[in-house]
Image: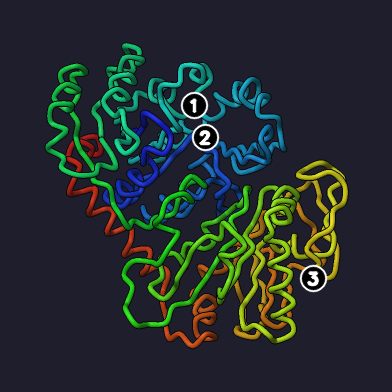
């Protein structure tokens, strides 16, 4: 049986709510027809999917599969997207071409994928995309109401009260539903509530009388929740911007700063640091944020050329090059790491003769000698590389997801490291070696850190949502 969690708007909390339900109803199959995110993951068979569905599957006790997210849209610039279908790129397309032409052509293919899932899976949790009532997007929709109608999927609608207008959003969404859609609607969930929930009683009574559906939960705002974000909207929130929770007073913390570029990709790379009690972790929005950092990281990028220009205009490039010089000369004991796109920026030159991200040749940061050339073919795959650094020696496993053809996939010079691999900080022995280098004694296991956080969130949901209303559909 399948159920769906839809929403009145984007960023209402669908992803985290589905993750809690995956934890509660183990062995469920998470599904999201279309996702727009630069936070991507690679499945075991080298298919690209949104990281949100990957971590939902891990919470549910399953391995990530490309069928969990048939369509992933990765913005390349304001007018173009990399269209990923069934784990493989269809190429960088104008956004208008996707929404006016391509989406129509793949709609029934997505339905076919879901039909196969229905045949094999007993419990499926569908996460909707954005608002379920966008009437201008509905004709070729395969993520929200059209999917529910086609497969008779009962659905709940979640709405974010933090941004205001929750009663108008819920009733407005209900009014836009067709008769068949209203028949499939089970109830509502109000998310991110500050203050006394009893103050909502009059509004909830109105909703239930107006729609004939129950509000099955009001979830209070979780102040220090640290679950991975679906996209970069989460950067504006304080939870990943300052000292971590669960900290121990008086203990030394590793100061890690990750440069926030406009097209930062696969930022789940740094999630283990955000959870750690031993880390002062934050994004660097200004060059001054890099001052006195123990570890500075240039992250992956879906548009290396744009982000490189951003580094120059913002002053980050000058700051990072100066940092590299100080590290090489021994005047500063900090670690500088480039991951994938960030690694590519560290070379002397970058060339794109295929207009994949740039146009022609540009100068890189010049920290590493050599030239990166972009290829139309994307390099995808899991790989193990033997790292040899000042602080670590041994195999590190991660995955490639890039157009750049590199002179070498791994670079190490003193305290400067560059690698094409994503996911390296999820490996406990490599991550903990950085702590030890700075004299911090810790042997953290990422699995335990993540289990602690998802369990906290799941209990929060169970205490504030009548989960039995959902359980009914899985019995």
The disc, 2 or 1, on the residue closer to the chain's N-terminal end is 2
Give residue 400's quadrant in the image. Answer: bottom right
Indicate which label's residue lies in the foreground, 3 or 1. Answer: 3
Mark 2 and mark 3 lie on one chain; the one further toward the N terminus is 2
Circles 2 and 1: CB atoms closer than 8 Å: yes
Question: Which part of the image, by quadrant, shows the C terminus?
Answer: top left
| Residue 142 badge | 1
The correct choice, above or below, for 11 with respect to 149 in the image is below
Nearest the camera: 320 or 451? 320
Looking at the image, tell me whether mark 3 or mark 1 is earlier in sequence order.
1
Looking at the image, is 178 positioned above or below residue 415? above
**Quarter placement of the N terminus:** top left
Q: Secondary structure at mark 3?
A: strand
Task: Name the residue that disc number 2 marks.
Answer: 34
The answer to whether residue 380 is seen in the rendering is no
Taking depth in this image into account, of 327 and 175 the one nearest to the observer is 327
Residue to which mark 3 is pinned: 368
Distance of label 2 from label 1 (alpha carbons) = 8 Å
Q: Position of residue 471 (x, y in %)?
A: 21, 40
Name the front one of labels 2 and 3: 3
Residue visible at 25% across and 35% down in the picture? 189
Looking at the picture, the colour scheme in use is: rainbow
Instruction: Give residue 122's mark.
Output: none
């Amino acid at each position: 049986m399948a159920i769906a969690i839809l929403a009145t708007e984007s960023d209402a909390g669908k992803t985290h709510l589905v993750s809690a339900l995956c934890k509660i109803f183990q062995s469920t199959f998470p599904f999201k027809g279309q996702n727009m995110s630069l936070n991507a993951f690679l499945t075991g068979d080298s298919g690209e999917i949104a990281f949100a569905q990957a971590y939902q599957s891990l919470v549910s006790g399953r391995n990530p599969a490309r069928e969990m997210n048939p369509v992933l849209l990765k913005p390349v610039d304001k007018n173009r997207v990399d269209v990923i279908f069934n784990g493989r790129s269809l190429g960088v397309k104008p956004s208008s071409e996707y929404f006016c032409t391509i989406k129509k052509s793949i709609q029934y293919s997505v339905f076919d994928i879901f039909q196969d899932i229905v045949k094999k899976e007993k419990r499926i949790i569908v996460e909707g995309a954005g608002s379920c009532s966008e009437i201008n997007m509905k004709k070729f929709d395969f993520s929200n109401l059209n999917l529910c109608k086609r497969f008779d999927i009962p659905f709940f609608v979640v709405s974010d009260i933090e941004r205001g207008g929750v009663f108008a959003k819920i009733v407005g969404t209900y009014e836009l539903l067709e008769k068949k859609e209203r028949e499939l609607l089970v109830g509502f969930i109000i998310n991110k509530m500050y203050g006394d929930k009893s103050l909502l009683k009059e509004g909830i009574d109105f909703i239930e009388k107006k729609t004939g559906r129950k509000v099955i939960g009001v979830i209070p705002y979780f102040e220090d929740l640290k679950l991975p974000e679906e996209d970069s909207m989460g950067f504006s929130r304080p939870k990943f911007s300052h000292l971590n929770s669960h900290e121990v007073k008086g203990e030394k913390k590793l100061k890690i700063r990750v440069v926030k570029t406009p097209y930062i990709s696969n930022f789940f790379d740094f999630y283990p640091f955000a959870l750690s009690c031993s880390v002062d972790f934050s994004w660097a929005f200004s060059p001054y944020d890099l001052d006195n950092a123990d570890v500075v990281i240039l992250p992956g990028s879906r548009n290396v050329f744009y982000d490189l220009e951003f580094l120059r205009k913002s002053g980050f490039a000058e700051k990072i090059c100066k940092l590299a010089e100080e590290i090489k000369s021994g005047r500063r004991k900090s670690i500088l790491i480039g991951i994938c796109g960030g690694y590519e920026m560290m070379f002397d030159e970058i060339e794109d003769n295929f207009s994949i991200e740039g146009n022609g040749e540009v100068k890189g940061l010049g920290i590493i000698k050599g030239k990166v050339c972009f290829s139309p073919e994307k390099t995808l795959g899991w790989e193990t590389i033997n790292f040899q650094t000042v602080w670590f020696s041994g195999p590190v496993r991660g995955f490639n997801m890039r157009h750049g053809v590199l002179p070498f996939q791994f670079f190490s010079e003193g305290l400067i490291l560059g690698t094409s691999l994503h996911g390296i900080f999820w490996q406990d022995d490599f991550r903990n070696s950085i702590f030890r280098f700075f004299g911090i004694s810790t042997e953290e296991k990422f699995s335990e850190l993540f289990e602690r956080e998802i369990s906290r969130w799941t209990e929060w949901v169970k205490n504030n949502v009548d989960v039995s209303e959902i359980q009914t559909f899985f019995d």
